[in-house]
Amino acid sequence: MEKALWYLLTATRGGANRARIIDALADRPMNANELADELDVGYKTIRHHMEQLEDHDVVESGDEEYAKLYFLTDRFDNYRDTFEEIVEKMDE
């Protein structure tokens, strides 16, 4: 997971938006439309980032197809300190 977080947040162009998504989901579960509104990012962009975050087990979605909610995974919670460390280094 640590390597996945470094890759998702620093090795690709969308790292800053992915960090913002993770921060938003730490407050409460949201669907893609809510995230797009909250972060002022296009819906398609959010969907792309959510696919990447799901593929790397950072987020998981509920079972609903329409307006499905996204949650941070339990596995991510074990690496929250790593996430915070990476974000700090991104801000430098």
Image (cartoon, rainbow, N blue to C red):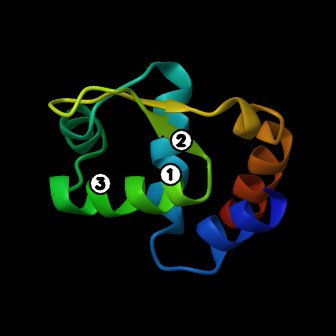
Q: Is residue 73 above or below residue 42?
A: above
Compared across the picture, whether 24 is left or right of 38 comes to right
Name the element at disc 3: helix
Name the image quarter holding residue 10: bottom right
Q: Which residue is mark 2?
A: 59
- Secondary structure beneath dot 1 equals helix
Q: CA distance from mark 1 to mark 2?
A: 5 Å
Residue type at mark 2 is Val
Q: Are dots 1 and 2 in contact, CB under 8 Å? A: yes
Q: Are marks 1 and 3 in contact (CB under 8 Å)?
A: no
- Crowdedness of circle 3 by 10 Å Cα count: few (<14), some, many (20+)? many
Specify which label sits upstream in the sequence, 2 or 3.
Answer: 3
Vertical order, 88 against 69 (above or below):
below
Q: Are marks 2 and 3 in contact (CB under 8 Å)?
A: no
Badge 1: how crowded within 10 Å, few (<14), some, or many (20+)?
A: some
Q: Is residue 79 left or right of residue 33?
A: right
Residue denoted by label 1: 54
Q: Which residue is mark 3?
A: 46
Farthest residue in the top direction? Answer: 28
The picture places residue 88, in percent across and down from the top left corner, at 76, 54
Category of crowding for the residue at label 2, using alpha-carbon neighbours closer than 10 angstroms: few (below 14), some (14–19), many (at least 20): many
Q: The N terminus appears in which quarter of the rendering?
A: bottom right
Q: Residue at x 70, y 54 (%)?
A: 87
Nearer mark to the viewer, of 1 and 3: 1
Residue at left 25%, top 26%?
A: 64
Decide which of tag 1 and tag 3 comes sooner along the chain.
3
Q: In the rendered view, does 10 fall on the left or right side of 54?
A: right
Q: Residue 52 location in percent, x, y?
A: 47, 63
